[in-house]
Amino acid sequence: MIVLHFELYNKPFLEAAVKRNDDIIIATKHKSKSDVIDASGNLKGMYAHELKYLSQNNYKPINVSESECETIKAWFK
């Protein structure tokens, strides 16, 4: 259900924002991979899908440092 919702609503919204080069601010900064990905490699909720999309598109939210961004990208490799 989460994946379907992400594909139908959140992903098109993020695609448009990235295309426009909008400033994106993330509301919650998770500090570890286990906060967004479970032990089986499954994404934990909508936020994880959004982070994955942004990181796979090399899009850095404005309130995330370069170092934090690189850490987040590494979670999804």
Image: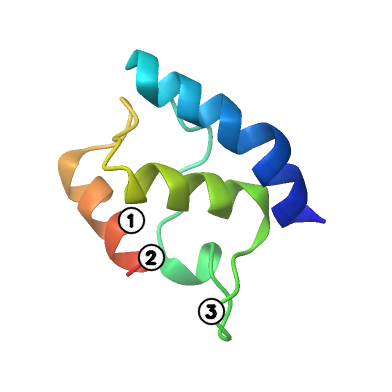
Residue situated furthest left in the rendering: 66
- For the residues labelled 2 and 1, say whether their Cβ atoms are less than 8 Å apart: yes
- For the residues labelled 2 and 3, say whether their Cβ atoms are less than 8 Å apart: no
- Mark nearer the N terminus (2 vs 3): 3
Question: In the rendered view, does 53 fall on the left or right side of 38?
Answer: left
Question: At numbered mark 2, what does the secondary structure look like: helix, strand or loop?
Answer: loop
Q: Quadrant of residue 72?
A: bottom left
Question: Given the image, on which type of amino acid does mark 2 rest?
Answer: Phe
Tell me which residue sits at (45%, 47%) in the image.
Answer: 53
Tell me which residue sits at (64%, 35%) in the image.
Answer: 10
How far is mark 2 from mark 3, CA to CA?
9 Å
- Asked if 31 appears above or below 23 in the picture, the reply is below
Q: Quadrant of residue 24?
A: top left
- Nearer the viewer's eye, disc 2 or disc 1? 2
- Asked if 56 appears above or below 9 in the picture, the reply is below
Q: Position of residue 4 (x, y in %)?
A: 75, 51
- Mark nearer the N terminus (3 vs 1): 3
Which circle marks residue 41 in the picture? 3
Question: Given the image, on which type of amino acid does mark 1 rest?
Answer: Ile
Q: Position of residue 67 (x, y in %)?
A: 17, 49
How far is mark 3 from mark 1, CA to CA?
14 Å
Residue behind mark 2: 76
Question: At numbered mark 1, what does the secondary structure look like: helix, strand or loop?
Answer: helix
How far is mark 2 from mark 1, CA to CA?
7 Å
Question: At numbered mark 3, what does the secondary structure look like: helix, strand or loop?
Answer: loop
- Asked if 11 appears above or below 41 in the picture, the reply is above
